[in-house]
Structure formats: C-alpha cells, structure tokens
Amino acid sequence: DLFDTDSIGQASMSAQSFGADAVLFNKTYTEAESLMFIDTWEMVKGNTSLPTFINAKIGLEAIDKIIALNPYGIIIGNAITAAENPTQAAKTFFEKCAIR
C-alpha cells in the first residue's frame, strides 16, 4: 500500500524487495487534479514490475479514464455500496471493466 508515503516512486520500486506481491495505489481521482493523478500513477507504474491496483474513490464519470491507465485491477467501493441500486452499480462497473 502506497498510502501516505513520502516517496511514492521509491516505495513502489522497493515493494518487491520487501516481499510485496502487489502494489496498491491509493489516490483520490478528481477531474481538477487528473494530470497530477496520471503523473503520480506513471511514477508508481514505471518503478515496479509488480501488479498494481488503483483504489481512487472512482465514480462512473471517471472509470473510463482509470481503465485507460491499464492497472492490474481497480478497487471500487463507495460508488457501489452507497449507490441507490448497488447491484446495478456493480454490474455497470463490471461491464465497463470487462470491455477492456
């Protein structure tokens, strides 16, 4: 988990030597900060060969942009559990991710 690290690139590079099996990229995605999000993602992904997952408080409005980053996996929580119809929300996210 790269949450609250001072050097995210170094942490992702060191993860394998510390025995990690995967990297979890935690950063909230907002349209206003999308360039910073992408820059940080590229720093993480470029410094590790481990499978890297994104956990970014992702909503339907941003899922296509997150999918385009080609993470190993995407963790979606609140956008499903807080939805008016969680079953339909989960199905929608699944279908969007399955297309890729």
Image (cartoon, rainbow, N blue to C red):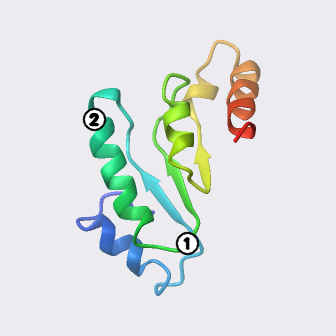
Residue occupying image coordinates x 71% and y 24%: 92
Along the horizontal axis of the image, is 11 left or right of 69? left
Amino acid under label 1? Leu
Along the horizontal axis of the image, is 52 left or right of 93? left
Which quadrant holds residue 98?
A: top right
Residue at the disc numbered 1: 50
Spot occupied by residue 5 in the image (x, y as percentages of width and height): 29, 64
Considering every residue shown, the one lying at the far top of the view is 84
Q: Is residue 33 above or below residue 86?
A: below
Q: Is residue 13 above or below residue 73?
A: below
Q: Which quadrant is the C terminus positioned in?
A: top right
Q: Which quadrant is the N terminus positioned in?
A: bottom left
Spot occupied by residue 47 in the image (x, y as percentages of width and height): 40, 72
Amino acid under label 2? Glu
Residue occupying image coordinates x 51% and y 40%: 66
Which quadrant holds residue 82?
A: top right
Residue occupying image coordinates x 68% and y 31%: 96
Spot occupied by residue 41 in the image (x, y as percentages of width and height): 39, 54
Judging from the image, what secondary structure is the residue with disc 2 in?
Answer: helix
Identify the disc placed on residue 61.
none
Between residue 32 and residue 91, name the one nearer to us. 32
Judging from the image, what secondary structure is the residue with disc 1 in?
Answer: loop
Number of residues whose C-alpha sits closer than 10 Å to that of mark 1, classed few (under 14), some (14–19) or many (20 or more):
some
Residue occupying image coordinates x 34% and y 62%: 43
Q: Is residue 33 above or below residue 59?
A: below
Number of residues whose C-alpha sits closer than 10 Å to that of mark 2, classed few (under 14), some (14–19) or many (20 or more):
few
Residue at the disc numbered 2: 33
Along the horizontal axis of the image, is 20 left or right of 47? right
Spot occupied by residue 55 in the image (x, y as percentages of width and height): 50, 46
